[in-house]
Structure formats: structure tokens, C-alpha cells
Amino acid sequence: MREVWRMWRYSTMVVLTVLTAASFAAILIPFKGLPLIPGYTELRPANVIPLVFGLLFGPAGAWGAAFGNLIGDFFGTLGIGSFFGFWGNFLAAYLPYKLWRGRPLTLTRAQALPFALAVLLGAGGCALIIGFGVEAFKLLPFSIIAVAVLLNNAVIVFLLAPLLLKLLEPRVSRWDLHWRDLMDPEDYTPGPAPRLGLALAGFGVGGGLLVGLALSWAPAALPAPPSLELALAPFVLSLILGCVLM
């Protein structure tokens, strides 16, 4: 996770963060009038930005997605949930680029499975963090917001990301704007246990969503249903630990 902090030393990475945030917010804001859950989320074709810009710009894409979402929230959905939306959208870019691990960005059939996993991991991480926060503050049930965020992210990305990557990747490569081209290797060395970190992150995302939805949809099947946020906390901690180790 070293590159997440050290990227601020590079002026071009800061510019790419601003570019990502501005692009994300500029696409988010016009769709604020098409809410899926009023006051919390809306139809978001802009959700393609975190994954694509994360793969291209690495940590700059992650920070840009986080700040861009916060800017968008000022236009109708700002609240306690915005804190979790900030980190959820950070993960929507961070997890895919960490999973991708330098694979070519020209998508082929051989890369279909890794790409699908990257999309689902990013969308799932975003859904878990936002759903956990909204549930903890009793703003909305976990099942409603988590499913909405997961589908809103994954479907949009599957539909639009291949085309956007095809358009942008050759230009980013030609202009040497890929994040690994801009940062010194010692500033983006992997964490102490990247494979374990990825496994913990995947366990946290997958397990957290499954447990959260199971407890939300079938609480009567349990003799003493636990507090949902307490049940989700170990999975959220697993996700955070995984991010640190990657």
C-alpha cells in the first residue's frame, strides 16, 4: 500500500488525481436527478471511472474516485454516508489495480476471468463498506444499499469498461502516463504479503456480502440474530488488513 501515500510526491500523479476526480464528478452530477434510492444513490454510469482510471493511474485513480464521489455528494446526497462512500469508491479503484498486478491492459479472452474478478472485487468492496456504514448508523438496511451499490457498479463497469479501456489505454501508454511509468519502483513495491492480502480482501468482500445479505433476508431463521454491524465487522477488518498487506 506504499504507493497510496508516496504518490503525493509526484506532481503528475497529483494532476491525474484531480483529472480523475473531475471526470468522475462531472459524470455523476447530471444523473443526480435519476435516483435509485433517494438521498443515497442514483443511476451512475460514472461508476466506470474508478475501475478504468484505477487500472490506468493506480493510486491516483483511487484517490480521484474517492474525492470525485465526495464532490458529487455535495449535489444532493451529502451526509454521514459520504464518509463511507469516500472509502468505498477508493476501494472500487484500489482493489482492481492491486489484483491486476501489471497485466496488459489490452483485454483479451485470456484476461476475461481476471477482469471479471477485478470488477466484482472492486464493486463488492465498495458495496460492503457503504452498506456497513449505512447499516451501522441505521440509515438504510444493509440489503437495500449493498445490493444497489453492487449492481450499480458491476453492471455499468461490465458494459462500459472494455470500450473505455480500448479508447484510453493506447493514449496513456503513448504518453507514458501509466502510474508505474511515473513512480520510482521503490515507491510501489508490494506489501509484506500481497497474496495473503488479496486472499483476505477477497474473503472480507465475499464473506461480508454473503453474511450481511443472509442476516438481512432471513433473520427469523436464527435463534438469536446478532447485531448486523457486529457480524460484518470481522469481514470489514479482513478487507482492511488485506489492503494493507497487498
Image (cartoon, grey):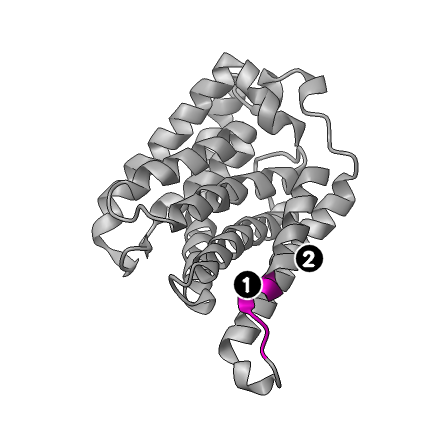
Main secondary-structure element of the magenta-colored stretch = helix
Q: Name the element at disc 2.
A: helix
Q: Which of marks 2 and 1 is nearer the N terminus?
A: 2
- Is 219 inside the magenta-drawn segment? no
Report the front residue among 80 and 48: 80
Q: Look at the image and tell me whether residue 246 can be seen.
A: no
Q: Position of residue 9 (x, y in %)?
A: 56, 14
Q: Position of residue 93 (x, y in %)?
A: 52, 40
Q: Position of residue 80 (x, y in %)?
A: 38, 49
Pointer 1 local density, CA inside 10 Å: few below 14, some 14–19, many at least 20: some
Question: In front of the other: label 2 or label 1?
Answer: 1
Residue that numbered label 1 is attached to: 229
| Above-or-below relation of 162 to 59 | below
Cα separation, mark 2 vs mark 1, equals 17 Å
Q: Quadrant of residue 184?
A: top right
Residue beneath the point at 55% across and 51% down = 125
Residue beneath the point at 66% across and 58% down = 234
Give me the disc on residue 203: 2
Residue beneath the point at 47% across and 52% down = 158
Q: Look at the image and tell me whether residue 129 can be seen.
A: yes
Residue contact between numbered discs 2 and 1, judged by CB atoms under 8 Å? no
